[in-house]
Amino acid sequence: MAERGYSFSLTTFSPSGKLVQIEYALAAVAGGAPSVGIKASNGVVLATEKKQKSILYDERSVHKVEPITKHIGLVYSGMGPDYRVLVHRARKLAQQYYLVYQEPIPTAQLVQRVASVMQEYTQSGGVRPFGVSLLICGWNEGRPYLFQSDPSGAYFAWKATAMGKNYVNGKTFLEKR
């Protein structure tokens, strides 16, 4: 109960030492569709659950795995609208890079820039942290890449990982392989 007074401020720590808005965003990710990324020597596989919430949905209108450039793609767990905002932002960042350097953005640079956007939303007024984690994969210089970014703006490189519902079981399964 003591944490309620801290849930509206992005940068105020609760008595237990947590940023409550980040905790809410992480809870949205943990309740999201399970997503998995696996890096191999010749590419990366991204997969997610695509469950129809209604028979009235047009299946083609729901995009859970999105291309950003010809060599970078991403998938999410968490809140779909937040994902669409980040997809748009990632595409814009990739286009800006291409306009300046006349070459595709390296995967690691795009990950760093998208994670910076996510981190800005943890401390800017009038916004809340994105309730989404991303798996970002790419192919540069003959090598595959797989990264995960979380709502705090932290990002990590992985060989294989899982996120979303039951992510602990997913990671355990991947570790045994």
Image (spheres, rainbow, N blue to C red):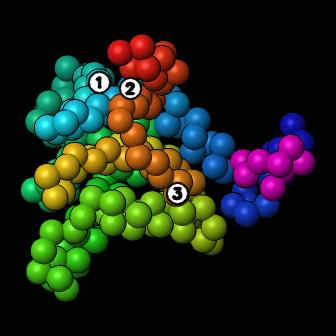
Q: Is residue 177 above or below residue 96?
A: above
Percent across and percent down for residue 4 are: 81, 45
Q: Are marks 1 and 3 in contact (CB under 8 Å)?
A: no
Residue at mark 3: 153
Point 38% across, 26% down: residue: 34
Q: Residues within 10 Å of mark 1 (few under 14, many from 20)?
A: few
Q: CA distance from mark 3 to mark 2?
A: 20 Å
Q: Is residue 40 visible?
A: yes
Q: CA distance from mark 1 to mark 3?
A: 24 Å
Question: Is disc 3 placed on a helix, strand or loop?
Answer: loop
**Which circle's residue, 3 or 2, is located before the other in the chain?**
2
Q: Is residue 5 above or below residue 44?
A: below
Question: Is disc 2 placed on a helix, strand or loop?
Answer: loop
Label drawn at residue 34:
2
Point 32% across, 44% down: residue: 146
User: Is 17 in the magenta?
Assistant: yes
* Near-viewer residue (146 or 3): 146
Q: Are marks 1 and 2 in contact (CB under 8 Å)?
A: yes
Please name the amino acid that badge 3 sits on: Gly
Percent across and percent down for residue 82 are: 40, 51
* Near-viewer residue (62 or 144): 144
Please name the amino acid that badge 1 sits on: Glu
Residue at mark 1: 49
Point 16% across, 58% down: residue: 141
**Which circle's residue, 1 or 2, is located before the other in the chain?**
2
Percent across and percent down for residue 163 are: 44, 31
Q: Which residues are magenta?
A: 13-20
Q: Are marks 3 and 2 in contact (CB under 8 Å)?
A: no
| Closer mark to the observer between disc 1 and disc 3 | 3
Q: Quadrant of residue 76?
A: top left
User: Is 56 in the magenta?
Assistant: no
Label drawn at residue 59:
none
